Amino acid sequence: MYTQFSPQIFVLYSIGLFLGSIYSVPPLQLKRFPILAGGIIAVVRGFLLNFGIYYAVREALRIPFIWSPVVVFIASFMTVFASVIAITKVSKVLLHLWCNIGPTTWGSLLFATLTCYVQAYPLSKCTEP
């Protein structure tokens, strides 16, 4: 690939490969962390996919590299759109955590915390004899 495309396109694809690897390869697997996963999804789907593919096709067709306001707009719009998808993913994870722990368990945790506090500091210690 390095011999067929310019260094800029090679760098874009290398960044995409790196982000895809740290997103899913077991030592890091950043897809486990919703905020980092959302950021990677937004960058790859929004910027790299639109900007990189468009200019790689232009280069393959031997059309020179120029900054196009249309492509900048599309890449920016899709980055924002992918960020919204990422936020939705983060909210789904938080909702999943809430449903797994459940409001009953949250209430039990609050009750247990208050019970421990009351046992540690009973009213008899707070009142004067």
Image: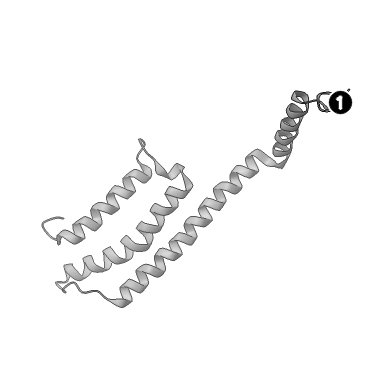
Most distant residue in the front direction: 128
Task: Find residue 56 and report its image quarter.
Answer: bottom left
> Where does the N terminus fall, quadrant-wise?
bottom left
Image position of 49 (left or right of 67)? right
Q: What percent of the width, then of the height, locates residue 111? A: 75, 34
What's the residue at 37%, 60% (across, down)? Answer: 45
Element under disc 1: loop
Amino acid, disc 1: Glu
Most distant residue in the right direction: 129
What's the residue at 81%, 24% (across, down)? Answer: 125
Question: Against 22, is 111 above or below?
Answer: above
Question: Against 68, is 46 above or below?
Answer: above
Mark 1, residues whose alpha carbon is within 10 Å: few (<14), some, or many (≥20)?
few
> Where does the C terminus fall, quadrant-wise?
top right
What's the residue at 28%, 48% (across, down)? Answer: 18
Q: Nearer the viewer, residue 121 or 81?
A: 121
Q: What percent of the width, then of the height, locates residue 112? A: 73, 30
In the rendered view, how is the structure colored? one colour
Most distant residue in the left direction: 3
What's the residue at 24%, 55% (across, down)? Answer: 13
The residue that mark 1 highlights is 128
Q: What percent of the width, then of the height, locates residue 74? A: 36, 72
Image position of 124 (left or right of 26)? right
Image position of 126 (left or right of 35)? right
Q: What percent of the width, then of the height, locates residue 97? A: 60, 42
What number of labels is visible? Answer: 1
